[in-house]
């Protein structure tokens, strides 16, 4: 096949690129998918170091029968190709002030019962909270449009009054409608690291989406690592006639004087031409590096310049022997109560105070190594420790002023600090392996500006319809991924892929609605 013979060229085999590529190939389009790395998936990938598996993401949501993401898997015939382990708890909240952890069960009624047992004076508040978020999710978000017309927008206050009412609310403001309990608010917002902002900053509507996706539609882990999802999608894509090339680093999107995208050029000066171009790459990199500012409309340029990027993270993977209770193995993530600063040494070196950036959170996910290999020994586990928010600018300055050697030393210090915390908590026993990912790692692996793990921050002014549209100011150039509607995170990338595919298939898939 000639390099000019593609209906659609997709840059980036992250979830947005893979899912949209699958849908378009299934519907008969000739699709080329270009990936910078040697494996697909982006943040939903698994790679190995020294023989140990490194999962970028641990669990994911929304796979119960009838859920939106499950419908995508069934539509593409992917679900039966994965061995999914349903988790009983989305999170476990461990408090410094309580003797027992709070289990955030994925069964909503069981979760409410658990909350009421710990907060007996907040029973009405808990019922009221869940009643409202279920109405927002079931009656409004799932029935909204990804690209409403002017007349549809005029009808929003009547069709979707809660979306309009809470569009500018932070989650803290939303929670305050129901309760004044600080600790109950912390528990209800326990999953905020998955959106990258604490409850004082994150959009209320995005937190509602996160809660309902995990608590209503289930939390799951894939045996063999989440990278199995990306592998299944990549294999499926090729079986349907799609073309997938790895280790292709795109340097530019070719745009003519009429602001029409014609193709892409990689860093080896190879040119791939297609009828339509889709970017699954970080927004700033797409427009500022791949397209170039001179081709952008003033509106697009202004929107990018005013946008606020999400935070980054530090991720520590540890292999160790341990005795883990079943309660902890059946949970997506355990939120630890330790208020530590993994960037403390860098701040001291650079003389920087980042305290205004907000609260930090440390979450640990645990998997038995036999989920990855039958050769592992009994009681050997992988611990995936994620610390939010990390600050890209600090790590960039560290590299500039102190170089790679100091960078590697600090990574090792962070690993040892986390290991000691886990050992002190009696979570792990004999240590065997560790690996640290920093904001610079995120920038390199995800091709993300400033190491931003979620592209645009999930703040009220950047939620839902305020995110970028799938169409752009460049003719025949489209966007897919969490930067677009509905955003944010992995679930947002799945949904974005459906919305984009519907546009390219001229409404033949979901007919303009957030559905399939």
Image (tube, grey):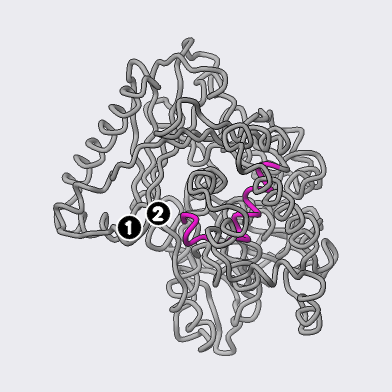
- Bin the neighbour count of mark 1 within 10 Å (Cα to Cα): few under 14, some 14-19, many 20 and up: many
For image coordinates 73% across by 47% down, the residue present is 69
Residue 336, position in %: x, y?
Answer: 42, 35
Span shown in magenta: 197-215
Q: Which residue is identified by label 1?
A: 392
Q: How many marks?
A: 2
Query: Of helix, strand and loop, which mostly describes the magenta segment?
Result: helix
- Spatial CA distance of label 1 from label 2 is 7 Å
Side (left or right) of 236 relative to 249: right
Q: Quadrant of the C terminus?
A: bottom right
Whether residue 427 is situated above or below residue 147 in the rendered picture:
above
For image coordinates 47% across by 59% down, the residue present is 200
> Sequence-wise, which precedes: disc 1 or disc 2?
2
For image coordinates 70% across by 51% down, the residue present is 128
Whether residue 419 is situated above or below residue 487 in the rendered picture:
above
Q: Is residue 377 magenta?
A: no
Cβ–Cβ under 8 Å for marks 1 and 2: yes
Q: Which residue is identified by label 2?
A: 312
Residue 183, position in %: x, y?
Answer: 49, 44
Judging depth in this view, the residue of 497 and 392 nearest the camera is 392
Judged from the image, the secondary structure of the residue bearing numbered disc 1 is helix
Judging depth in this view, the residue of 21 and 208 nearest the camera is 208
For image coordinates 58% across by 67% down, the residue present is 169
């Amino acid at each position: 096949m000639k390099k000019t013979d593609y209906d659609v060229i997709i840059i980036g085999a992250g979830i947005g690129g893979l899912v949209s590529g699958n849908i378009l190939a299934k519907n008969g389009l000739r699709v080329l998918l270009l990936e910078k790395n040697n494996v697909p998936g982006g943040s939903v990938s698994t790679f190995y170091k020294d023989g140990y598996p490194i999962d970028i993401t641990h669990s994911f949501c929304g796979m119960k029968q009838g859920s939106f993401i499950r419908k995508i898997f069934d539509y593409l015939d992917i679900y039966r190709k994965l061995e999914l382990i349903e988790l009983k708890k989305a999170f476990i909240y461990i408090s410094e002030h309580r003797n027992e952890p709070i289990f955030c069960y994925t069964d909503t009624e069981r979760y409410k019962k658990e909350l009421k047992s710990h907060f007996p004076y907040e029973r009405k508040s808990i019922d009221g909270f869940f009643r409202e978020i279920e109405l927002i999710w079931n009656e409004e978000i799932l029935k909204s449009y990804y690209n409403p017309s002017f007349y549809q927008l005029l009808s929003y206050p009547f069709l979707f009054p809660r979306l309009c009412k809470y569009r500018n609310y932070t989650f803290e403001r939303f929670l305050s409608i129901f309760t004044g309990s600080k600790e109950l608010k912390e528990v209800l917002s326990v999953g905020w690291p998955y959106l990258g902002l604490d409850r004082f900053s994150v959009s209320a509507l995005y937190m509602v989406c996160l809660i309902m996706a995990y608590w209503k539609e289930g939390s799951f882990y894939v045996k063999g690592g989440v990278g199995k999802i990306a592998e299944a999608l990549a294999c499926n894509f090729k079986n349907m006639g799609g073309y997938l090339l790895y280790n292709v680093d795109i340097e530019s999107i070719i745009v003519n004087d009429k602001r029409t995208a014609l193709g892409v050029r990689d860093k080896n000066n190879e040119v791939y031409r297609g009828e339509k171009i889709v970017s699954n790459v970080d927004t700033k990199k797409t427009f500022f590096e791949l397209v170039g500012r001179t081709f952008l409309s003033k509106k697009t340029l202004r929107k990018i310049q005013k946008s606020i990027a999400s935070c980054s993270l530090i991720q520590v993977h540890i292999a160790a022997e341990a005795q883990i209770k079943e309660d902890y193995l059946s949970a997506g993530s355990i939120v630890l109560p330790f208020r530590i600063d993994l960037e403390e040494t860098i701040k001291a070196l650079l003389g920087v105070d980042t305290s205004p950036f907000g609260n930090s959170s440390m979450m640990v996910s645990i998997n038995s190594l036999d989920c990855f290999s039958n050769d592992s020994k009994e009681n050997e586990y992988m611990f995936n420790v994620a610390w939010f928010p990390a600050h890209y600018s600090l790590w960039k300055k560290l590299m500039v002023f102190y170089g790679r050697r100091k960078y590697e030393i600090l990574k090792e210090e962070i690993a040892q600090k986390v290991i000691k915390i886990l050992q002190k908590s009696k979570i792990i026993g004999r240590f065997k392996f560790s690996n640290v990912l920093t904001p610079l790692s995120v920038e390199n692996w995800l091709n993300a500006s400033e190491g931003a793990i979620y592209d645009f921050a999930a703040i009220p002014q950047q939620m839902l319809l305020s995110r970028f549209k799938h169409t752009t100011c460049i003719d025949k150039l489209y966007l897919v991924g969490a930067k677009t509607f509905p955003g944010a995170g992995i679930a947002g990338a799945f949904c974005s892929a459906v919305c984009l595919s519907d546009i390219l298939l001229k409404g033949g898939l979901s007919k303009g609605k957030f559905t399939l």
